[in-house]
Image: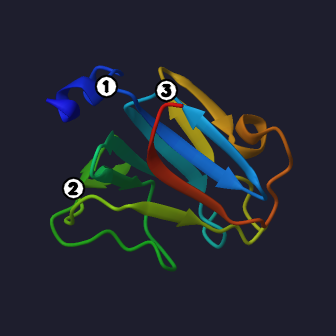
Amino acid sequence: MAAALAQRGGGGLSLCLASAGIVKALSIAAFTLAWTHSVEKTGWQEDWRVTPEGLVLVQARVKGSGAGMEPPPGARLIDGWFRWRPEGGPKPQVVLGNSGAAGEWRLCHGGNCRTLSDILGHPVGVTVTTMSSCTNL
């Protein structure tokens, strides 16, 4: 029941982002995490779902292949993107690092993408950001 409510954006679940002592709760049940690969300078995207058990990676895609970006066996090339469904269960948290060499993480929801710096209200730079499922306060 709670998972069904979360998929509709209810049930008290949010995506929590924590970085440099700042915590932001976003009332979203699904989102895309997007970034540019630091070596190949090509796009990478992951679709995530927020559940009571944690964050679930639903689909991943990469625009091309190269250093550290090899799509796994079973990935399909669709519209210029290698797409696949990663295996694994919910993750209690996902830690995002940034080398500073390729731009910033972007979080997309409802057709809009924003950088983590914009969402958190301070320049994230190379500071670690942690994503997790949280209960609305």
Element carrying mark 2: loop
Q: Which residue is mark 1?
A: 11
Q: Which residue is mark 3?
A: 27
**Mark nearer the N terminus (3 vs 2):** 3
Q: Quadrant of residue 106 in the image?
A: top right
In the picture as drawn, the residue positioned furthest to the front comes out as 137
CA distance for labels 1 and 2: 26 Å
Mark 1 vs mark 3: in front = 1
Element carrying mark 1: loop
Estimate the x, y position of residue 31 in percent, counting from the top left. 43, 36
Estimate the x, y position of residue 130 in percent, counting from the top left. 58, 59
Mark 1 vs mark 2: in front = 1
Q: Which residue: 54% across, 44% down?
A: 16
Q: Which residue is mark 2?
A: 85
Measured along the vertical axis of the image, is residue 80 above or below residue 91? above
Residue 43 appears in the rendering: no
**Mark nearer the N terminus (1 vs 3):** 1
CA distance for labels 1 and 3: 10 Å
**Mark nearer the N terminus (1 vs 2):** 1
CA distance for labels 3 and 2: 25 Å
Q: Quadrant of residue 91 in the image?
A: bottom left
In the picture as drawn, the residue positioned furthest to the right comes out as 123
Q: Identify which amino acid the numbered label 1 is placed on.
A: Gly
Residue 125 appears in the rendering: yes
Q: Identify which amino acid the numbered label 2 is placed on.
A: Arg
Quick one: 121 or 110, which is closer to the camera?
121
CB of mark 3 within 8 Å of CB of mark 2? no
Estimate the x, y position of residue 2 in percent, counting from the top left. 21, 32
Question: How many callouts does the rendering have?
Answer: 3
